[in-house]
Image: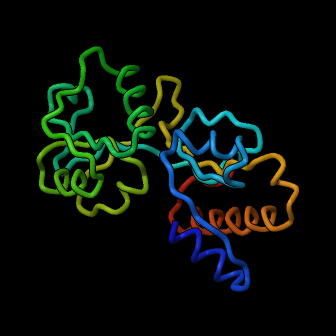
C-alpha cells in the first residue's frame, strides 16, 4: 500500500486516492462489484477481464546448507503460510516432483520469521524471488515444472471494466506499469508481460 501511494504521489502529487486492504481472494470480487476501481492480486488463477500482469517472481528452494533436491522430502522444511497463493504454487510444484509429502519441521504465518529460520539453518523453505533475494549467504535452487517452465508467483493489476474508461484510472495504471518495468529491470525479475 505504502509503495503504491509513494509511487503515484511522486509522479502526481496533486492526485488523491484511497487505498483499501483486503485478502487476495476478495480483491477480484471487490473490483467486479465496483467497490474498488483497481486491485492488486497475486496468483496464477486470477482470471478476470481487465487484468494486467505486472510482475513474474520465480520461486526458489532456499537453504543455509547445500541440498540434494532429490532428497528434499526427508529434509526438514519450514512452511510460511502467510502467502496462500505462493504456497499453492509451491504445493503444485512439490506434487509434480515428489511422491512423498513435505517433512514440515516448523510452521509460521510470518514470512520474515520463516526467512530467519532458514537463515539460521533450521530447514529449507519454498520462497518467492522477492523473499529469496532479501536473504544473503543462502543456497537458492530454482523451482521448475516438469516441462521446464519456472515455477512462479504472478502479480496482477485487476481493473473494473467501467472504471477503466476513467482518465484517472488509466493514468494510475500507467504509472504502476512503468514503475514495475523499472523495478523489474533493477532486480532482474521477469516483469510485465
Residue in the picture at 22% in, 30% down: 72
Provide residue 131's location: percent of width, then percent of height: 37, 56
Q: Is residue 176 visible?
A: yes
Residue in the picture at 77% in, 44% down: 50
The chosen color scheme is rainbow
Residue closest to the eye, 131 or 22: 22
Q: Is residue 103 left or right of residue 3?
A: left
* Numbered label tally: 0
Residue in the picture at 19% in, 45% down: 66
Residue with the most extreme top position: 99
Provide residue 148's location: percent of width, then percent of height: 51, 30
Q: Is residue 109 above or below residue 131?
A: above
Residue closest to the eye, 166 or 133: 166
Residue in the picture at 40% in, 37% down: 143
Q: Is residue 52 visible?
A: no
Q: Is residue 179 above or below residue 147?
A: below
Provide residue 91's location: percent of width, then percent of height: 37, 28
Q: Is residue 179 left or right of residue 26?
A: right
The quadrant holding residue 101 is: top left
The quadrant holding residue 185 is: bottom right
Residue closest to the eye, 7 or 124: 7
Provide residue 76's location: percent of width, then percent of height: 14, 35
Q: Is residue 70 left or right of residue 9?
A: left
The quadrant holding residue 60 is: top left
Amino acid at each position: 500500500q505504502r509503495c503504491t501511494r509513494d509511487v503515484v504521489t511522486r509522479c502526481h502529487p496533486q492526485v488523491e486516492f484511497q487505498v483499501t486492504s483486503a485478502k487476495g481472494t476478495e480483491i477480484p470480487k471487490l473490483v467486479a462489484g465496483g467497490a474498488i476501481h483497481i486491485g492488486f492480486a497475486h496468483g496464477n488463477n486470477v482470471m478476470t477481464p481487465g487484468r494486467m500482469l505486472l510482475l513474474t517472481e520465480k520461486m526458489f528452494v532456499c537453504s543455509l546448507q547445500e541440498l540434494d533436491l532429490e532428497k528434499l522430502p526427508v529434509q526438514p522444511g519450514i512452511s510460511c503460510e502467510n502467502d496462500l497463493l505462493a504456497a499453492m504454487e509451491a504445493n503444485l510444484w512439490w506434487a509434480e516432483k515428489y511422491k512423498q509429502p513435505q517433512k514440515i519441521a516448523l510452521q509460521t504465518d510470518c514470512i520474515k520469521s520463516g526467512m530467519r529460520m532458514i537463515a539460521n539453518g533450521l530447514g529449507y523453505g519454498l520462497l518467492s524471488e522477492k523473499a529469496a533475494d532479501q536473504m544473503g549467504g543462502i543456497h537458492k535452487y530454482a523451482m521448475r515444472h516438469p516441462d521446464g517452465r519456472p515455477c512462479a508467483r504472478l502479480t496482477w493489476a485487476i481493473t473494473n471494466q467501467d472504471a477503466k474508461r476513467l482518465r484517472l484510472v488509466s493514468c494510475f495504471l500507467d504509472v504502476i506499469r512503468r514503475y514495475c518495468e523499472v523495478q523489474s529491470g533493477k532486480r532482474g525479475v521477469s516483469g510485465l508481460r
